[in-house]
Amino acid sequence: MKLTINFKQILTSAILLAATGYVAARSEMRPSHYVADGNSAITVNGQAKFNRALYGAHSGFRIDCSDTPEFGIYLPRMGGNLCLTLPEGKCTARYTPGRMDYEQGGVKVEAQVMRSEDMALWAITNTTNKTASIPVRFGGVADKKFYREGDLGVDDPTCFDLKPEYCTGNVYTVKGDKINIEYGKKQRSTLTLVIPAKSYKITDLPSYEGTLSIKPGKKVYLALFPASDAPKASLESLFKKRKTNVNNWPQASHSRLPTNGSIR
């Protein structure tokens, strides 16, 4: 009896088996936690960090959003970490083209990035019937160059965390709601925050820690921009302008939002 070996079939079967094992392994490594919801993608009580980027102007400026309201700032180079601590409750994060929204404990956070200039904006709304105290923390303007611009899956996943070594050389100057942070080893530059905090302190790191006090039904705005002067227009008007532009973008097809696999 003559035995015929079809090497082509054997090779094809081996490739298919390897591909199946790879897909299964990837599914175990990165379980689905975002699901499509109309033109948005949402996750509830997610734990991933810096997995959704909002891009600004052509300079490369962006903010990397997390499943909770913690944001990595890219100037380009490491431009800091901003974190908001919301009241206890279920945290829903929603990505819609051009914006990121959070809701937890009756407080809503909307994050936007201007496209005409380098600037990040946040609107924080208290929908409860009592005053909300929201801790806000910022620090770590390291001006550090990442291997691949902080890309997810390539650079260290903690590269946008607030680390003590990132804070070295940062000098804070606070005048009312305006915070200037001087940074840089070879060449000194200034980054500006606008935070209408009721109280604040500069920690030993150094970093900024403040508390927002938001009355029932009221809204406050935060801003960050890599310059030493605040914009002349009000943050509210800038936010409304940006929101109008985003709402006028062509809407993404529902079918283009995957319901399995992680969405960056």
Image: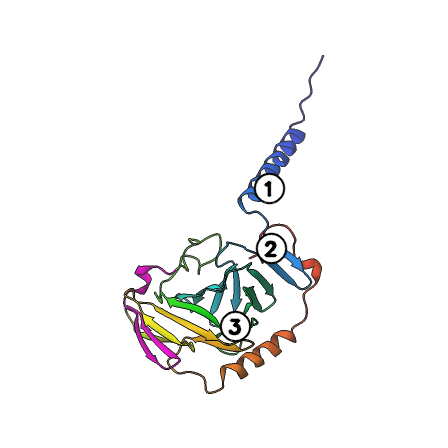
Name the residue carrying label 2: 34
* Residue for point 54% across, 55% down: 46
Q: Which mark is residue 130?
A: 3
Kind of residue sitting beneath label 2: Tyr
Kind of residue sitting beneath label 3: Lys
Q: Is residue 181 a member of the stretch shown in magenta?
A: yes
Above or below 72: residue 126: below
Q: Is residue 57 visible?
A: no
Q: Which mark is residue 23?
A: 1
Q: Is residue 187 a member of the stretch shown in magenta?
A: no
Image position, residue 151 (x, y; %):
47, 57
Secondary structure at badge 1 equals helix
* Residue for point 56% across, 42% down: 28
Residue placed most toward the observer, 168 or 130: 130
Earlier residue among tags 2 and 3: 2
Q: Is residue 73 visible?
A: yes
Secondary structure at badge 2 equals loop
Q: Are marks 1 and 3 in contact (CB under 8 Å)?
A: no
Image position, residue 79 (x, y; %):
39, 67
* Residue most extreme to the front: 130
Magenta stretch, residue numbers: 162-185
Above or below 229: residue 142: above
Direction from residue 28 to residue 258 in the image, left or right: right
Between the C-alphas of marks 2 and 3, the distance is 31 Å
